[in-house]
Amino acid sequence: MFTDSHCHLNRLDLSRHDGDLSGAIAAMKEANVTRAMAIMCDFAEYDEIANIVSKYNDETLNLGMSVGIHPCEDISVLQSATVERLIATASAEQVWAIGETGLDYYWSTENKLAQQASLARHIHASQQLKKPLIVHTREAKDDTIDILKAESAEHGIIHCFTEDWETAKKALDLGFYISFSGIVSFKSAQIIRDAAQKVPKDRLLIETDSPYLAPVPKRGKPNEPAYVPYVASCLADLYGSSVEEVGALTAKNFENLLAQYH
């Protein structure tokens, strides 16, 4: 029922599972997580993620992956993401999306121009492959929206949304989906919850961004895809609906996102 739209399966802390990824996969299934997208941040990760997706994709768990370069990577890595290389790497059927790309001025400001150029190239690859774009933005909301608009990006996800309703509205107007992580459950996240209450229900997604940002009541512990129902639970409380309803709704929305060009 539940879809984790953004997780880093190759980076999970597996201490809870005796160091075995199969334990985390079993926990996903036990939590009724039936689909997940494993996110790539660097070309060096491709083979490892692709192998995980191939090994664990079965009739009870639908796994796919993305191809992209995270904006916090070194300038040389950002520059390696040419449109041609992105397209060649992301053409496989198991690659569902392009990213994680975007802008992050919190961790790095000296490579702003390289980040911006990389984001534009990811947008062009997304458009040519007709696969959704996964956008990371931190302390860069205006530039992010401006570049998405300038490059006519209209198909993708603003992942791990941490901004206000005004920013969400601008992304929604472009055609993007908004994905909420465990941050929405934090006491300090009222602005994010306010935005979540206004996002149209057919544009809503949930994610863990695991191994980071575990939701309440797991906050402070290593995160994993099995915890995505807790994100759904927080949103269910906001909407006055059930966890199952939010799980089914966001799973359907993810299907619609992938099917948008097909």
Image (cartoon, helix red, strand yellow):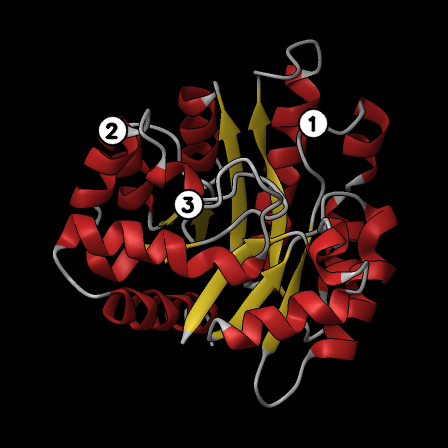
Q: What amino acid type is highlighted by mark number 1?
A: Cys
Q: Percent x, y for residue 83?
A: 72, 47
Q: Percent x, y for residue 129?
A: 61, 63
Task: Quadrant for the N terminus, please.
Answer: bottom left
Between circles 1 and 3, the one closer to the viewer is 3
Between circles 2 and 1, the one closer to the viewer is 2
Q: Percent x, y for residue 258?
A: 47, 69
Q: Which residue is mark 3?
A: 217
Answer above or below: position of 51 versus 111: below
Q: Residue at horizontal 30%, vertical 56%?
A: 233
Mark 2 or mark 3, which has the lower sequence index? 2
CB atoms of marks 2 and 1 within 8 Å: no
In the drawing, does residue 244 fall left or right of residue 181?
A: left
Q: Which residue is mark 2?
A: 190
Q: Is residue 95 visible?
A: no
Q: CA distance from mark 2 to mark 1?
A: 27 Å
Q: Residue at horizontal 33%, vertical 24%?
A: 188
Answer above or below: position of 222 versus 95: above
- Mark 3 secondary-structure assignment: loop
Q: Residues within 10 Å of mark 3 (few under 14, many from 20)?
A: few
- Mark 1 secondary-structure assignment: loop
Q: In which image quadrant can residue 172 be found?
A: top left
